[in-house]
Image: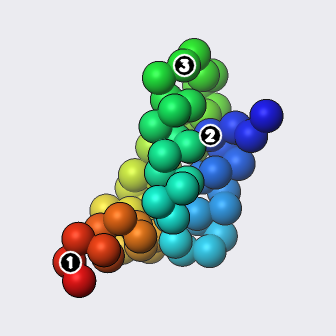
Amino acid sequence: MISIRNVVQEALSTGYLTIEAEEQLRKMLVKKYDIEDFRAFMNLQQAAMAGLVKQESRELLHS
């Protein structure tokens, strides 16, 4: 099974978070996860706020 860390790593390496990846994260975050997944998610949040990762869903909202 894919982990939060895997989804985050993909987004950080590409600089892009797809709608599908966002949905995967939502589903995984409602279940039990470990501290490393939590840290990875927080890193993704910080990268998105800093503009290092673009979100497909936000791009669609503003187009």
Marks 2, 1: nearer the viewer: 1
From mark 2 to mark 1, how far is it between C-alphas? 27 Å
29 up-or-down from 14: above or below: above
x 20%, y 78%: residue: 62
* Mark 2 residue element: helix
Question: Which three-letter amino acid code belongs to the residue tagged 1?
Answer: His
Tell me, yes or no, if residue 35 can be seen here: yes
Point out the residue furthest to the right here: 1
Q: Residue at x 51, y 64 (%)?
A: 18
Where residue 42 is drawn, which disc sits there?
Answer: none
Residue marked by disc 2: 4
- Residue at disc 1, secondary structure: loop
In the picture, which quadrant includes the N terminus? top right
The residue under label 1 is 62
C-alpha separation, residue under disc 3 versus residue under disc 1: 31 Å
On the question of residue 41 being in view, the answer is no
Question: Alpha carbon of mark 3 to alpha carbon of mark 2: how far?
Answer: 11 Å
Crowd around label 1: few <14 · some 14–19 · many ≥20 (10 Å): few
Instruction: From the top left corner, tell me how far across and down residue 59 is, in percent.
Output: 32, 76
Tell me the kind of residue under disc 3: Lys
Residue at figure coordinates x 59%, y 65% from the top left:
12
- Looking at the rendered structure, the kind of residue marked 2 is Ile
Q: Residues within 10 Å of mark 3 (few under 14, many from 20)?
A: few
- Where 13 falls versus 41 (above or below)? below
Q: Which mark is residue 31?
A: 3
* Numbered label tally: 3
Quarter holding the C terminus? bottom left
Q: Give the residue at the far left of this rendering.
A: 62
Residue 28: percent from the left, percent from the top?
56, 31
Earlier in the chain: of badge 3 and badge 1, it is 3
Reading the chain from its start, which is encountered first: label 2 or label 1? 2
- Residue 15 percent across, percent down from the top left: 54, 74
